[in-house]
Image (cartoon, rainbow, N blue to C red):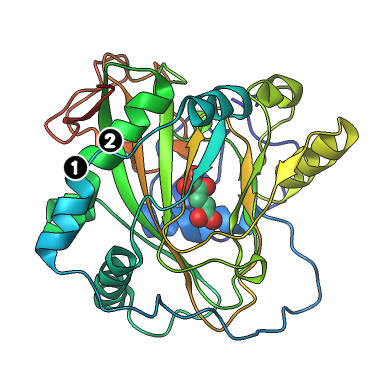
Amino acid sequence: MALTPEAPSDAAAVNDKLPEQNRDGGIVQDWAGDDQDWWDWYVTLAANDAAPVELVDGPGLPDVEAASDEQLAAELAEPYPLTAEAVEHFARDAFVKLPGVLSPAVVRRLAERLEQLLVDEHGADVSGRFTALEQMWLHDDLMRTVALSPRLGGLAAGLLGEDGVRIYHDNALSKESGCGRTPWHHDAEHFPLDTVQAVTAWMPMSAIPGRMGPLSFARGRDVRDDLADLEFDKVGTSYDTAVAERLAQRGVAVESSPFAVGEVSFHSALCFHTAGPNGTTQPRRALATTYYADGAHVIAQPTLISGTWREFLPGVEPGGLAASDLNPVVGTAS
Ligand SMILES: O=C(O)CCC(=O)C(=O)O
């Protein structure tokens, strides 16, 4: 992505979801809002069809009894058998989708807790929005079990080929009924880290059929090089559109498939990804936890695309070692 340190050329363009303090200048500035403000702004950067999305029924939650806290903790402590094929897939394509990382009973338990946390924070009147929570692990025992899970951390370390990975943050990502697309992007521009050895585990809280907006991935570690000259647009949808056009021109394959219950994707910071609109009556919910290689530093000039990064790395200044008290090592390759 090409950075624009000076003001965008169309000075008249305004995005009213950008905090006022962020409207002037380019992207090399601190985000002035909170994490939810960031998401409310971010989804405005996606191009959507003009026609309204007709909502169909969603798949519902897994039709099983929810796991107990003990069952959930035991499952998430157990290593997942990572195959050489999966590691190769991740190394080549910059993402991999793994089946059965979570059992249906664990998904159900987490989905029920997440519903409660989201309603507590955002209320019930959220139709059409993208609502988020972050750093849940600091105040919720169940979410802490997920964020610090040896199973998930071990998968992150194994896929990255790192001896140790630290947690950057956890997230809840709730694309409510009728919410539009997530813009094309890659996370190396989201995490203010001097490494691309970072990965996000995206854990759906139900099955996610195509109509519900599953995460979709452009195949290949080198895709970023093909897109590096495109200029980020903090006001409108031109970057999202330009990425889509370039991917089509270059014939880059995009993996856009439903998620089964318990399937979890891992996408590298290099992976360009997007998600479709949620055309169902059910919120499309996922937990997303990000990990990065131990030893990484914060870059010299974080941008507003990194949102509330100081909350995830408290006390760490640009250039500093990314290892605050909120970034324990949670996964090892062994
Ligand atoms: O859930 C979404 O629609 C987007 C999530 C995403 O981009 C990510 O987890 O990196």
**Residue at image point 30% right, 48% down:** 170
Report crowding for label 2: few under 14, some 14 to 19, many 20 or more residues within 10 A (C-alpha): many
Q: Which mark is residue 323?
A: none
Q: Amino acid at mark 1?
A: Leu
Q: Is residue 182 left or right of residue 138?
A: right
**Residue at image point 31% right, 14% down:** 319
Report crowding for label 1: few under 14, some 14 to 19, many 20 or more residues within 10 A (C-alpha): many
- Image coords of residue 167 (percent x, y): 26, 35
Q: Which residue is mark 2?
A: 153
- Image coords of residue 146 (percent x, y): 23, 51
In the figure, 110 relative to 295: above or below? below
Q: Is residue 137 left or right of residue 193?
A: left
- Image coords of residue 207 (percent x, y): 50, 67
- Residue 126 visible in the shown view: yes
Dot 1 falls on a residue whose secondary structure is loop
- Residue 10 visible in the shown view: no
**Residue at image point 44% right, 30% down:** 83
- The one of 144 and 4 positioned closer to us in this rendering: 144
In the figure, 261 relative to 74: above or below? below
Q: Which mark is residue 148?
A: 1
Label 2 and label 1: CA atoms lie apart by: 7 Å
- Image coords of residue 109 (percent x, y): 25, 70
Are circles 2 and 1 on residues that touch, CB within 8 Å?
Answer: yes
